[in-house]
Structure formats: structure tokens, C-alpha cells
């Protein structure tokens, strides 16, 4: 009898690109992919931030390069992917939030949040996929969604709108790309402590309201997402596409 062998979580020989890679979740996911053997291209607007992350990854024995890019500049996005060999893995992570009651949302707020969280995510994926298909690459797209793409939340109308839209986008991507061997999935975290979210948790009442919803009783950390990204990027998830992996501590379980 020959026992089945667990598919590898290693990413040796594969090329990954991570958007919003200068801080928070993007840094952690880039580090996870590099630790598993991928060559990681770090993308963000801030050259200093992604340059520092690339140096840290290299110092830890990984391989990384920094590439300054504003993903809201769609012409620049197209040029970026056209000028490089096809990637095997995309982590579509760049995003923003402007929390406020829906009555106070301005058109500028709408364009900022939906523009980055949805429009940019769509066209980054499209440009990446075109290169994958041209090269015959059977790749993995990983979009960073949110538990707020599964539930509602006070003062989160724009963020919820964008993340619910990403959920539908992901399912349609999975169907369009299956014939090309390209998978598309989402990681949907609960509140994760990052430089962007840390100021919110200084409000004791807000932090208490969040902890009341997270059944495991703690705010998420970026490390909580690293295994999920590695799983979805690797052969261990070879038959998984069009799904959303909730990393929410039980928020959406009831």
C-alpha cells in the first residue's frame, strides 16, 4: 500500500506579487510567501517602505524586490505587468477605508474607497491574468477581502460595499479563469491590528464592541493570515477556487 502524500506548501521557483506591501497585512503575506521559497515583488506607492521590507526579507534569507507603483493608475498597472515575466501568484491587498455614517459619506469618499478596493483590485487582477494566460501559467489570485464582505457594520457602508463586491468579483473570476488553470480566492479577515487600524482600538468602547463579536476573544494579528495565504498560493489548495476563507475568530458564525 502506498500512502497519499500531502501536496507541498513550498513555493520554490514561483514568482509572487503583493500589492500594498509596505505595511501591515501586505508585509506579513510577502514574508510568508518568501519564507516558502517564492521570489516576491513588493508593490506600493512608497519606495522607502517597500525597499525596507525587501531588505528585511533578504536579510532573513528570502528573495524580494521593491517596485514603486500606484495601483490606482491603471495605465501604470498595465505597463508594470507587461514589462515583467508572468507572475505565478498575485496577492491583491492594497485597500483603504473611510469609516463614517452613510449620511456623511461624500462622493470623494465613495470614489476613494470603491476606486482602490474594487476598481484597482479588478484591473490589477486583469493585467496579471493577461500575462499569466499569455505565458501558460497556472496561477493563483488571492484577494484580501474582509468579514465585512459577509456582514454589515456601523459606519462601514463604503467598506462593506467594496468588500461584498469583491466577493462577487472573485466568484466570477474563478469561472472565467478555470479553463486556464488559474484559481481565484479570497482571504476575509476580521479586525487585524495594523498601522491603519491601531488608532481605532485606542477607543475603548470600539475595541470592546469588536471583542464582543470575535468569539475567540482577541483582535487578529497579521500572523493569523500568513498560513491562509501560503495555503491558497500553494499546491495544497489545488482544487480550491471561487471561495472565501474567513479568518474572523467566529464573528460570522452566528
Image: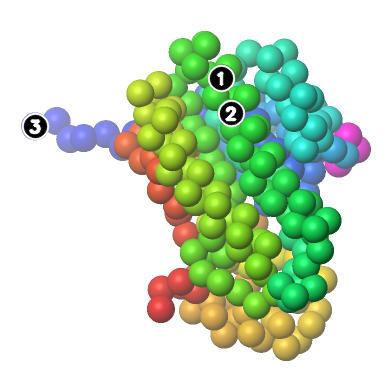
Main SS category, magenta section: helix
In the rendered image, residue 243 lying in the magenta stretch gets the answer: no
- Give the residue at x 55% y 49%: 166
In the displayed structure, 160 sits above or below 50; it is below
- Real-space Cα separation, disc 2 to disc 1, in angstroms: 6 Å
Query: For this rendering, which residue is in front, 50 or 122?
Result: 122
In the displayed structure, 224 sits above or below 201; it is above
Question: Which residue position holds label 2?
Answer: 126
Q: Quadrant of residue 79?
A: top right
Return the disc, 2 or 3, that comes first in the chain's sequence: 3
- Give the residue at x 38% y 35%: 175
- Part of the protein shown in magenta: 47-51
In the rendered image, residue 50 lying in the magenta stretch gets the answer: yes
Tag 3 secondary structure: loop
Question: Which residue position holds label 3?
Answer: 1
| Residue 170: image location, x then y, percent | 48, 43
- Give the class, few, some or many, for how many residues have Cα within 10 Å of label 3's Cα (few <14, many ≥20): few
Amino acid at each position: 500500500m502506498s500512502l497519499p502524500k500531502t501536496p507541498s506548501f513550498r513555493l520554490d521557483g514561483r514568482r509572487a506579487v503583493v500589492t500594498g506591501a509596505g505595511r501591515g497585512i501586505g508585509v506579513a503575506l510577502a514574508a510568508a510567501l518568501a519564507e516558502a521559497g517564492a521570489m516576491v515583488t513588493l508593490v506600493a506607492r512608497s519606495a522607502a517602505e517597500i525597499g525596507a521590507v525587501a531588505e528585511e526579507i533578504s536579510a532573513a534569507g528570502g528573495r524580494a524586490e521593491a517596485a514603486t507603483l500606484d495601483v490606482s493608475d491603471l495605465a501604470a498597472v498595465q505597463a508594470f505587468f507587461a514589462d515583467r515575466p508572468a507572475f505565478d501568484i498575485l496577492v491583491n491587498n492594497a485597500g483603504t477605508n473611510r469609516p463614517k455614517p452613510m449620511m456623511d459619506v461624500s462622493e470623494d469618499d465613495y470614489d476613494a474607497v470603491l476606486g482602490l478596493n474594487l476598481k484597482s483590485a479588478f484591473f490589477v487582477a486583469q493585467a496579471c491574468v493577461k500575462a499569466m494566460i499569455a505565458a501558460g501559467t497556472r496561477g493563483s489570485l488571492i484577494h484580501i477581502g474582509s468579514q465585512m464582505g459577509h456582514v454589515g457594520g456601523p459606519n462601514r457602508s463604503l467598506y462593506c460595499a467594496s468588500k461584498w463586491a469583491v466577493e462577487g468579483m472573485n466568484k466570477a473570476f474563478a469561472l472565467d479563469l478555470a479553463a486556464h488553470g488559474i484559481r481565484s480566492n479570497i482571504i476575509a479577515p476580521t479586525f487585524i491590528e495594523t498601522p491603519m487600524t491601531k488608532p481605532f482600538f485606542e477607543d475603548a468602547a470600539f475595541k470592546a464592541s469588536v471583542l464582543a463579536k470575535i468569539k475567540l476573544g482577541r483582535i487578529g494579528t497579521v500572523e493569523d493570515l500568513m498560513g491562509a495565504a501560503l495555503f491558497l498560493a500553494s499546491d495544497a489548495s489545488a482544487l480550491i477556487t471561487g471561495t472565501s476563507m474567513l479568518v474572523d475568530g467566529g464573528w460570522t458564525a452566528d
